[in-house]
Amino acid sequence: MLKIIVIGGGYAGLSFIKNLDYSITKSANITLISNTKFHYKSILLHNVVSHKDDITIPYEELLPNFINFINDEVIEIKDKVIITKNDKYEYDILVVALGFSSDDFGIKGVKEYTYSMINYDNCLELNQILEKQSNSDIVICGAGFSGIELIGNLANKFKNSKDIKLKCIEAMPTILPMFDSTNALYAKKYLENLGVEFYLGCKILEVKQDSIMVENNGKQEYIKSDFTLWTAGVKGNNVIDDSKIFESKKSKVEVDEYLNPINCNNKNIFIIGDCALLKDNKSGKFYAPTAQIALKQGKYLAQAISSKIKNKKFDKKFVYKNQGTICSLGKDCAIGIIGGKAVKGKLASVLKKLIELKWDLKLKGIKALF
């Protein structure tokens, strides 16, 4: 029988498994390898940091009975063999759905003096550290999606605290550059009203134990920080760099329209999710890694591989169309673009919760009504 191995049980990996034609199990053994025993919703890691939310679901509650589950850490990917911390596994078809890691851009002091949201366990630890903060300047480096969702939660959490100062440093002249200026300005004013202090147009030069050195308008200055959270950038999984079978950039591999890695001889390897670099043919730019594109890649690949195993014709190329984006600013406020239209406030927050609910229903095998 064919050996299909999926490494990584995040949005991409589980989307692939959940969308398979289960009749292929007559001719294929399917195995999921993950370094955790549970799936966690990575887009909600900021909720773990701020409020210790449980965003996990054990794989035993999610996986169909025919999926073999192995709790192990992948070390290296080779041609037809996966090397893990405790064993090695042969495969005929490999789906690489590994997650992300933090990118420090080589800036001095980032590794030593900042904290990043990487996984569920590490975010629980960050929550414990935050709970002990008093008379503190808390700095978030990066005003992109992750940084703003995190600072939105923290601003709501500490809005009645007089001894916690929240600061956000961003190299760009505006926050949330993926949104239009009206939405971004709304988010900025909302957070400022909650006490957030923004340092825009500030390039981070070095992170120290008690401060951050930035360049602002050609001048160097120091911003006081007692606790620094790094959300300024992510890259793919380090396993990619450790696997000589791939040509990688920032721990990511460029893939073609069939999600095969470019410049790799094994066409039975597919890469989806955070480790995949997929180019938008219209703009010539790579798509940003999001849960939305990961889910769509998983669904497409499940259909492609199911058809291949059943000897059915499947000539479709993967095409991605962004259906919208919503960024939370806290419990009951958000901004977003849905169907090309801007939404904000409580309505956007409700829509975001509905999107999250739809994924929960999919995981549990329930068809969503929206």
Image: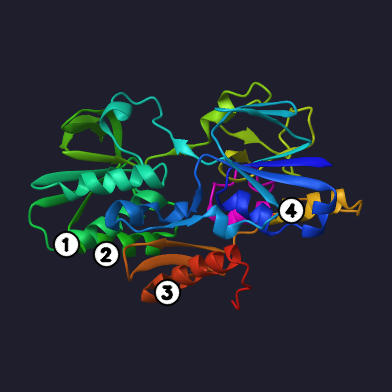
**Residue 199 lies in quadrant:** top left
- Which of pointers 3 and 4 lies earlier in the amino acid sequence? 4
**Residue 81 lies in quadrant:** top right
Q: How far, Cα to Cα, is label 1 from label 3? A: 22 Å
Q: Determine the secondary structure under disc 2.
A: helix
Q: How far, Cα to Cα, is label 1 from label 2? A: 12 Å
- Residue depth check, mark 2 versus mark 4: number of the one nearer the observer: 4
- Which of pointers 2 and 4 lies earlier in the amino acid sequence? 2
- What amino acid type is highlighted by mark number 3? Val
The residue where tag 4 is placed is: 302
Q: Determine the secondary structure under disc 4.
A: helix
- Residue range highlighted in magenta: 278-298
Q: Residue sitting at 37 percent across and 44 percent down?
A: 121
- Crowding near the residue tagged with mark 3, few <14, some 14–19, many ≥20 C-alpha atoms within 10 Å: some
How far across and how far down the image is residue 140, in percent?
A: 28, 44
- Which of pointers 2 and 3 lies earlier in the amino acid sequence? 2
Above or below residue 334? Residue 27 is above
How far across and how far down the image is residue 322, in percent?
A: 60, 59
Q: Which mark is residue 159?
A: 1
Q: How far, Cα to Cα, is label 2 from label 4? A: 41 Å
Q: How far, Cα to Cα, is label 4 from label 1? A: 45 Å
Q: Which mark is residue 190?
A: 2
Q: Which mark is residue 350?
A: 3
- Crowding near the residue tagged with mark 2, few <14, some 14–19, many ≥20 C-alpha atoms within 10 Å: some
